């Protein structure tokens, strides 16, 4: 979607290596989110941010860390990738908390494969 | 957070009206109901959001009964391009409740 980009779009990495996924927005939205999507589980929230340097855990945060040093960038890091982290990762942004008629805007996703 | 229950899948023919019902029995007073659409290999897309009664936009209508324990997304005269997964979410519209859960959604398949 316009205004939000994820990089890389695809990545294959080896077990035990660190991986960083980037989400970049040009909308100046306050809220940013990282979700993972797996068959049979829908989308599950990993971490979210409600401002620069303000982050909190979602329901599946183990094995992941995030950083937000600038409004426009939200980084997701897998410190030591495992095969269970093979997934499609989506970043989302919202001006408010997504519950005031605006909803979330999602990126196109990053397909990560850990071998 | 209120848990939601949706049908796993729905099949319909082109030109028909499709209704997808979401059950949320433990919805809280301040919870809003939001629906998203997701096509394969894309991120979800916001469709519509409401609190009570009926909301309509250029894409869909959302019907919410007085007890708010369920909601129905209505798609008028569907086409093949409406084939997608539809998610119902329930959450509060106030700072601090950013942990929205999407669930597994309803897979809508439109048949020519």
Image (spheres, helix red, strand yellow):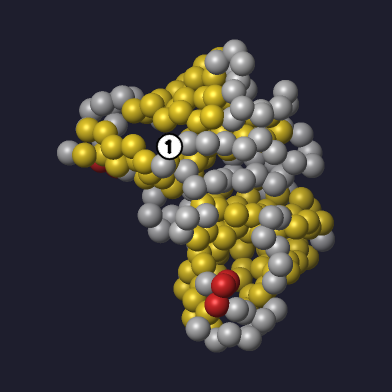
> Compared with residue A46, is residue A13 higher up or lower down, i.e. above or below?
below
Furthest residue in direction right, as rendered: A53
Is B109 displayed left or right of A43 in the figure?
left
Q: In the image, B90: left or right of B8?
A: right
Q: Position of residue A102 (x, y in %)?
A: 60, 36
**A8 is higher (above) or lower (below) than B9:** below
Looking at the image, which is closer to me, B31 or A77? B31
Residue B30 falls in which quadrant of the image?
top right
| Secondary-structure class at tag 1 | loop
Residue A4 appears in the picture as rendered? no
Q: Nearer the viewer, residue B47 or B11?
A: B11
Of A8 and B76, nearer the camera is B76
**Residue indicated by mark 1:** B7
Image-based side of A20 in relation to B44, left or right: right
Residue at image position (55%, 86%) is A14
Q: Residue at x 57, y 36 (%)?
A: B4
Q: To which quarter of the image does residue A91 belong?
A: bottom right
Residue A68 in sight: yes
Residue B69 screen position, x and y as percent: 59, 23
Name, please, the residue furthest toward the left: B112
Image location (x, y in percent) of residue B31: 68, 29
Question: Would you call the spot at circle 1 few (<14 residues within 10 Å), some (14-19), or many (20 or more)?
Answer: some
Chain letter of the residue carrying label 1: B
| Relative image position of residue B1 (x, y in whole percent) | 70, 38
- B111, A7: nearer the viewer: B111
The residue positioned 70% from the left and 79% from the top of the image is A79
Name above or below for residue B32 compared with residue B65.
below
Direction from residue A102 to residue A110 in the image, left or right: left
Q: Residue at x 48, y 69 (%)?
A: A111
């Amino acid at each position: 979607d316009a205004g939000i980009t994820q990089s890389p779009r695809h990545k294959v990495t080896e077990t035990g290596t660190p991986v960083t996924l980037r989400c970049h927005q040009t909308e100046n939205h306050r809220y940013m989110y990282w979700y993972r999507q797996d068959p049979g589980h829908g989308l599950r929230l990993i971490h979210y941010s409600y401002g620069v340097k303000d982050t909190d855990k979602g329901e599946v945060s183990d094995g992941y860390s995030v950083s937000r040093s600038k409004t426009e960038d939200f980084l997701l890091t897998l410190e030591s990738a495992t095969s269970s982290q093979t997934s499609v990762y989506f970043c989302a942004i919202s001006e408010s908390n997504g519950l005031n008629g605006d909803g979330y805007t999602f990126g196109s996703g990053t397909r990560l494969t850990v071998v | 957070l209120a848990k939601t229950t949706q049908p796993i899948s729905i099949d319909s023919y082109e030109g028909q009206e499709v209704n997808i019902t979401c059950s949320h029995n433990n919805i809280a007073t301040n919870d809003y109901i939001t629906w998203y659409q997701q096509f394969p290999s894309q991120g979800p897309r916001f469709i519509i959001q409401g609190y009570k009664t009926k909301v309509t936009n250029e894409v869909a209508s959302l019907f919410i009964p007085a007890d708010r324990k369920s909601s129905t997304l209505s798609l008028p005269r569907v086409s093949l391009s409406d084939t997608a997964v539809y998610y119902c979410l329930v959450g509060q519209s106030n700072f601090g409740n950013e942990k929205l859960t999407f669930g597994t959604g309803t897979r809508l398949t439109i048949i020519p």
